[in-house]
Image: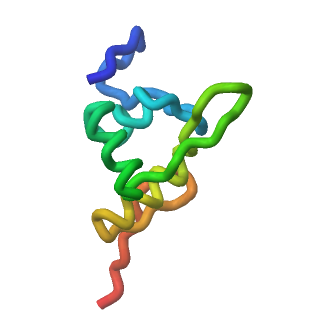
Amino acid sequence: MIMTNSPHPHTTPHWPRGLSRLRAAAYIGVTPQAFDRMVTSEEMPKPKMIGGVRRWDKLAIDRAFDAIFGTQTDSAGEEVYDFRA
């Protein structure tokens, strides 16, 4: 669980577009070790080097997570529902 100093403790934290390994793991709700295994097994994307540090693209993580669960999210990371009858 990520703790914030937000006056609204039940709101979701702000997730930057480029995530560190620890934040990427927290973003999808797994341990850093589980996230590493998911990257190795190509369930999650590999990082890119930005300014000499490894960063994961949050939108690429969203797409990978969608593929695992068979869902679809929009560019804001919100789940898209299909209500066709």
Q: Quadrant of residue 84?
A: bottom left
- Compared with 60, 34 (above or below) is above
- Compared with 20, 78 (above or below) is below
Instruction: State the image coordinates of residue 19 (x, y, percent, origin top left).
Output: 53, 33
**In percent of the image, x 58 and y 35: which residue is there?**
55
Q: Quadrant of the C terminus?
A: bottom left
**In percent of the image, x 54 and y 51: which residue is there?**
59
Residue at the extreme top: 5
Is 46 in front, or is 63?
46
**In percent of the image, x 38 and y 62: which residue is there?**
66
- Compared with 30, 73 (above or below) is below
Q: Quadrant of the N terminus?
A: top left
Q: Quadrant of residue 11?
A: top left
Q: Is residue 19 left or right of residue 5?
A: right
Is 54 in front, or is 27?
54
Is 60 in front, or is 75?
60
